[in-house]
Amino acid sequence: MTRETLERKIEELQDEVVLLGSMVEQALLDSVSALVKRNLETARRVYADDRFVNDKRFDIENRTLIVIATQQPLAGDLRILATILEIISNLERMGDYAKGIARITLMLGEEPALSPMSYFPEMASLVVDMLHRALQAFLDRDVAAAQAIPPDDDKVDAYYNQAYRDLIKLMGEDGEHNDQANFLLWVAHNLERTADRVINICERTIFVVTGELFEFKSSDDEVLADNFGLD
Amino acid sequence: MSQPAEFASPDGRYAIEARRLNIYYGDFLAIKDVDFAIKRRKITAIIGPSGCGKSTMLRSFNRMNELVPTAWTRGQVFFGGQDIYQPDIDPVEVRRRIGMVFQKPNPFPKSIYENVAWGARINGFRGDMDALVEQALIDAALWEEVKDKLDQSGLSLSGGQQQRLCIARAIAVEPDIVLMDEPASSLDPIATLRIEELMRELAKNYTIIVVTHNMQQAGRVSDYTAFFSIDEKRAGYLVEYGDTQKIFTNPEKKITEDYITGRFG
């Protein structure tokens, strides 16, 4: 009863975050589908629609700052609002990655696809599923659900490494398809970075519940650590 | 002092409006040249440092300043299309339609029931008094706590309950506007938050003007905020007036920002 206004405002902001998340999930799926099917129309739309993602991000940010300024949120309430600011920043960058993929589709035009293109639908599907689950875990304040997502990032990294090796090999072979290979490297990079940002969201969910900020280590980090004696 | 553009047109969207209002105590000018239009069924907060005339400004809206012998005004206060300071206006009727809740709860030394019924009775209410009392207590978020002890003294209640009783008393006579002068400053934090949530409920039906020295309260509860300060002659004046959200995130004047951020003086 006593903080009804604050609680209602937090719920409204969370609804907006879910909406922004849906926009980004759709943009990612559409951008990869457009790439694989060479659908320039869809690619153009994803590219142009990124401005709606940006607009909504700034709208949520503005409203969150107003709640912080006028409601004096503390403790858990403050962590939730700080996390909303982090999540929307990550979502906006993921939107940029989808836009980047759309741009590559437009630049590739009609050229026949190189074989690593076939990795991308599965990669995208996995990344979008991770994002969806991460946002749900945030809404549910579910630490276990947030912790279950990083192993999928390892799978995304594995796809990335495979695509990278294949594309580098193709570039070495005949030099005819270097542009496309380069573009597809970027697509793989964008999807891999999207997954990394989903992990940021998971870390923030744990922060909301426990008050502790901690970074998940990826399997790549662990390999590096073993090889180079890093912490 | 310029109004936010939306207030500028005199078309009855205001609940009450001060125009070129100056308030004196004897020779001392306490409030200088204020143009201040209050929007209907919104919560407007008046904030500012001690001595800036916030309570004087508030009391000018229902002619309560007249209870101070040396007080006099120049300028006008328009309510219901009329200047309430005209000689033919009945101040008692003004104070029924523009009620007031004070900093220290001041229930009558009567039963809870009588506290609420008394004003209505004086105003000639002939209908179902039990229903009126119940509704006022429900609207003041007090009914559940007192419904089984309406005959007990109003003074037997806790501070927060007494204040809600005073609110019930004020709204029982069906005012248009409720003036609140630091309504929660003598209450503990939980009672304070309950009063604030009650204010938001009341604003659905009444115009609320609240003076508060607690800026965070103004931020939490109000739609519009008016910042008053003191000039070099110690007269209070209206510095800035606008959407609370704007005042608290990006005020126009540096002096407003200094006050809001606690860098004043």
Image (cartoon, grey):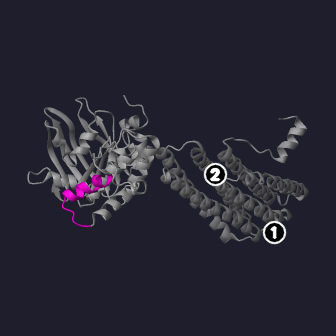
Q: Say left or right for B35 vs A176.
A: left
Q: Chain of mark 2?
A: A
Magenta-colored span: B112-127
Task: Count neighbours of disc 2 (C-alpha within 10 A) and say few if under 14, some if 14 to 19, many if 20 or more.
Answer: many
User: A175 or B214: nearer the eye?
Assistant: B214
Mark closer to the chain start, 2 or 1: 2
Q: Say left or right for B197 vs B81.
A: right
Q: Amino acid at mark 2?
A: Ile
Is B1 drawn above or below residue B119 in the view shown?
above
Q: Is residue A36 magenta?
A: no
Q: Chain of mark 1?
A: A
Is A74 drawn above or below residue B134 in the view shown?
above
Mark closer to the observer (2, 1): 2
Which quadrant holds the N terminus of chain B?
Answer: top left
Q: Position of residue B202 (x, y in %)?
A: 36, 56
Residue B26 bears which disc, if any? none
The reply to whether label 2 and label 1 mark residues of one chain is yes
Q: Say left or right for A108 vs B173.
A: right
Q: Which residue is mark 1?
A: A112
Q: Which residue is mark 2?
A: A87
Q: At 45% from the left edge and 47% from the top edge, which residue is drawn?
A: B193
Task: Count neighbours of disc 1 (C-alpha within 10 A) and say few if under 14, some if 14 to 19, many if 20 or more.
Answer: few
User: A193 or A129: nearer the eye?
Assistant: A129
User: A223 or B223: nearer the eye?
Assistant: B223
- Would you say residue A50 is visible in this rendering? no
Q: Position of residue A54 (x, y in %)?
A: 58, 56
User: A38 or B84: nearer the eye?
Assistant: B84
Which quadrant holds the C terminus of chain B?
Answer: top left
- Would you say residue B179 is visible in this rendering? yes
Q: Amino acid at mark 1?
A: Pro
Q: At 37% from the left edge and 39% from the top edge, which residue is drawn?
A: B185
Determine which quarter of the picture holds residue A20: bottom right
